[in-house]
């Protein structure tokens, strides 16, 4: 976790306590770290006075680095061991785990220092831009209990708000990248600690999406019994109607219910209480430690050496995690060359290639941190940030991964991509360009508004909907883009376009990326005749993948029976792609290829580029919009009927969330812990008619039950 350090004196008093630790803790409970500390000659245990001084923005010689009255003293990064590891370290007496923790923290801090330690440079921009310095000044503090005095080893890395640039000048630390890459750092730490513990002989299992894990053999009921603080937070969350998965709510509850750190009066008694609790649960930590010692292997790995060992390693890997590599993947070493790799090198190659394939489904370029995190979160044995970084270096050196533009002052590339992704992006834009003036107008633009209104049924089409429908029906471009916000009535305009096209002898095929969306597209649309009467209850619709699977190969062939069959099947057809922002890069390009090569009359893409996207989604819809296609916008949401709700929704779409709530004024009631009671009272005070049309939305089964 990451938190700001507001007070230099308060932080110094908190972290520099002498009696903080329980039992036989490590001899060195604190130490200086970072290349900035080396430059200042700060090493070994952290003295309170020195620590307070650097947090106060001063060097040891009292030179003031940052005298801004509003500055932050620093950043506190907390690296918490899995509960199972803490139990084995303290109840099982395995001090090797403490060394593994410290090594993992130092590895993570080294990565942070190399990539995210920045100063602000204003030579090109009045607001400043980040320049990597590669030098941090921080102190490490090892703690071994939670606030409820359960065993919980964790390390605080408190970073002073200063850094030294390449010219030796001390400047204020620009910490934006540290906050931004918090989850990247978490994944790096989890992977490093997990690898260290596996070398000690422990088996682990992934439990969270950022690489969180536990040690096998420590039962869930044991972990929960020694997680009193966590259980207290979850109980408070349930009482407030918050979900256990609501990260923001849990973070706020943690802050509000946090008690001052308790110092045990009798450390021996505390250890005895832990042992008694463990015995009552039938948990034998020492037995697990002994088992691990027998299985540990910290020696140097040798190359695989034979095809059989390569296959055994790959089989074990595929049995343990899901890989996304292709057969003979160009991003990995293949064939007999694999026998020269160690098992860890092979696993790292597979994890890195899988990460590129995963990200490449939704992006055409990515940051270094994104790639490292994605590779680590697969949970592949032995894969660490250092290993992935080394593999990135190899891929860049031989051109299998490409660096983006170097526009930064420190000459670092912002993004990376592959030749394949560059080609897909170019092909997508080329396909859109190839569709310019390549289609036919279904009707003349002048008659489109009247025709659309005739088939709108009970809906009154607004000017934006009319403009979008007119563009789709009257443009001579093959590819048409309709950018519409949520609730803009996009399904209504699809029905209207399909109805007019049907009257002109064309049939619309609806496309969507998931079966549920295909079903919604069918049930939510209808075909009307010139008199406005419904002639068919739904349009034909199917998934993008099934459509591409049927027609892409014939389209690429360019001739032959299958090509002719596909061209005939799509003759006079209008394709309408719904929720286009959710379609990945390659399938989007495949659709455009099919439309152009098989002579589809229209490909109308409808969606919202601002919509949240799942991991499989692509940015191709945004890419296409950036290249000035034939495009209409529907920016008016029809879901909000009153003026104040329209204003609030507009502010949300602009990213102004605080202002949106403020615009609602007294309509927003903040009731704190009593919000369920207040909500129920408000609803019960309504008239019977108003109750019938007033819904209550709440999170969590317990909250709904109480309501």
Image (cartoon, rainbow, N blue to C red):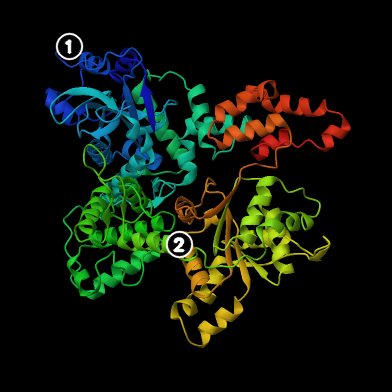
Q: How many marks?
A: 2
| The image quarter in which residue 273 lies | top left
Which quarter of the image is occupied by the C terminus? top right
Up the image or down, 157 lies above or below 471; here it is above
Left or right: residue 266 versus residue 277 is left
Residue that badge 2 annotates: 433
Nearest the viewer among 161 and 624 is: 624
> Left or right: where does residue 460 sit relative to residue 180?
right
The residue carrying mark 1 is 62
Q: CA distance from mark 2 to mark 1?
A: 63 Å
Pick the residue in front: 70 or 262. 70
Residue furthest right as drawn: 688
Q: Residue at x 76, y 28 (%)?
A: 680
On-image quarter of the N terminus: top left
Q: Position of residue 196 (x, y in %)?
A: 26, 47
Answer above or below: position of 229 versus 541. above
Q: Nearer the viewer, residue 283 or 76?
A: 76
Displayed quadrant of residue 638:
top right
């Amino acid at each position: 976790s990451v938190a700001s350090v507001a007070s230099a004196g308060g932080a110094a008093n908190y972290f520099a306590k002498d009696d903080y630790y329980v039992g036989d803790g490590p001899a060195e409970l604190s130490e200086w770290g970072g290349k900035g500390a080396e430059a200042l000659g700060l090493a070994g245990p952290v003295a309170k006075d020195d620590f307070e001084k650097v947090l106060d923005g001063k060097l040891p010689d009292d030179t003031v680095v940052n005298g801004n009255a509003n500055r932050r003293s620093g950043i506190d990064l907390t690296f918490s061991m899995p509960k199972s590891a803490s139990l084995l370290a303290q109840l099982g007496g395995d001090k090797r785990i403490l060394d593994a923790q410290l090594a993992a923290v130092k590895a993570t801090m080294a990565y942070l220092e190399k990539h995210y330690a920045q100063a602000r440079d204003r030579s090109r921009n009045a607001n400043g831009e980040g320049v990597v310095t590669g030098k941090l000044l921080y102190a490490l503090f090892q703690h071994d209990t939670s606030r409820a005095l359960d065993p919980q080893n964790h390390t605080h890395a408190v970073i002073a708000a200063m850094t030294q640039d390449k010219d030796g000048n001390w400047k204020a630390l620009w910490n934006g990248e540290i906050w931004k890459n918090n989850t990247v750092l978490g994944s790096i730490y989890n992977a490093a600690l997990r690898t260290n513990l596996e070398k000690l002989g422990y088996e682990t299992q992934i439990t969270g999406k950022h690489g969180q894990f536990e040690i096998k053999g420590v039962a869930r009921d044991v972990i929960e019994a020694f997680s009193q603080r966590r259980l207290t937070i979850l109980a408070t969350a349930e009482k407030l109607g918050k979900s256990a998965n609501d990260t923001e709510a849990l973070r706020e509850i943690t802050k509000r219910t946090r008690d001052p750190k308790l110092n045990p009066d009798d450390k021996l008694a505390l250890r005895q209480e832990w042992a008694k609790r463990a015995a009552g649960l039938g948990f034998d930590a020492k037995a697990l430690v002994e088992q691990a010692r027998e299985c540990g292997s910290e020696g140097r790995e040798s190359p695989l050496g034979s095809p059989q060992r390569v296959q055994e390693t790959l089989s074990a890997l595929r049995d343990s995690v899901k890989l996304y590599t292709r057969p003979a993947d160009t991003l990995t070493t293949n064939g007999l060359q694999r026998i020269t790799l160690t098992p860890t090198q092979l696993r790292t190659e597979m994890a890195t290639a899988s990460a590129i394939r995963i990200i490449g489904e939704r992006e055409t370029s990515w940051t270094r941190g994104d790639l490292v995190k994605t590779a680590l979160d697969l949970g592949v044995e032995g894969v660490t940030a250092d290993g992935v970084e080394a593999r990135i270096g190899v891929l860049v050196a031989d051109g299998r991964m490409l660096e983006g533009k170097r526009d930064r002052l420190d000459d670092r590339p912002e993004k990376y991509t592959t030749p394949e992704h560059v080609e897909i992006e170019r092909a997508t834009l080329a396909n859109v360009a190839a569709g310019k003036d390549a289609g036919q107008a279904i009707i003349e633009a002048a008659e489109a508004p009247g025709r659309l209104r005739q088939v709108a049924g009970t809906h009154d089409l607004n000017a934006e909907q009319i403009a979008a429908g007119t563009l789709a029906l009257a443009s001579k471009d093959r590819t048409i883009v309709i950018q519409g916000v949520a609730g803009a009535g996009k399904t209504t305009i699809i029905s209207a376009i399909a109805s007019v096209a049907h009257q002109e002898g064309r049939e619309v095929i609806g496309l969507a990326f998931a079966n549920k969306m295909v079903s919604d597209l069918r049930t939510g649309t209808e075909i009307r005749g010139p008199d406005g009467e419904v002639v068919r209850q739904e349009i034909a619709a199917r998934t993008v993948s099934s459509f591409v699977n049927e027609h892409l190969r014939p389209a690429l062939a360019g001739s032959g029976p299958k090509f002719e069959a596909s061209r005939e099947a799509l003759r006079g057809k209008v394709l309408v792609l719904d929720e286009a922002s959710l379609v990945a890069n390659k399938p989007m390009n495949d659709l455009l290829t099919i439309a152009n090569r098989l002579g589809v009359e229209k490909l109308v893409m409808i969606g919202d580029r601002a919509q949240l996207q799942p991991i499989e989604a692509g940015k191709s819809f945004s890419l296409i919009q950036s290249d000035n296609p034939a495009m209409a916008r529907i920016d008016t949401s029809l879901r909000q009927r009153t003026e104040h709700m329209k204003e609030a929704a507009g502010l949300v779409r602009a990213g102004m969330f605080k202002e949106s709530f403020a615009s609602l004024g007294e309509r927003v009631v903040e009731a704190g812990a009593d919000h369920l009671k207040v909500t129920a009272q408000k609803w019960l005070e309504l008239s019977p008619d108003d109750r019938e049309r007033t819904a209550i939305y709440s999170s969590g089964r317990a909250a709904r039950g109480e309501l």
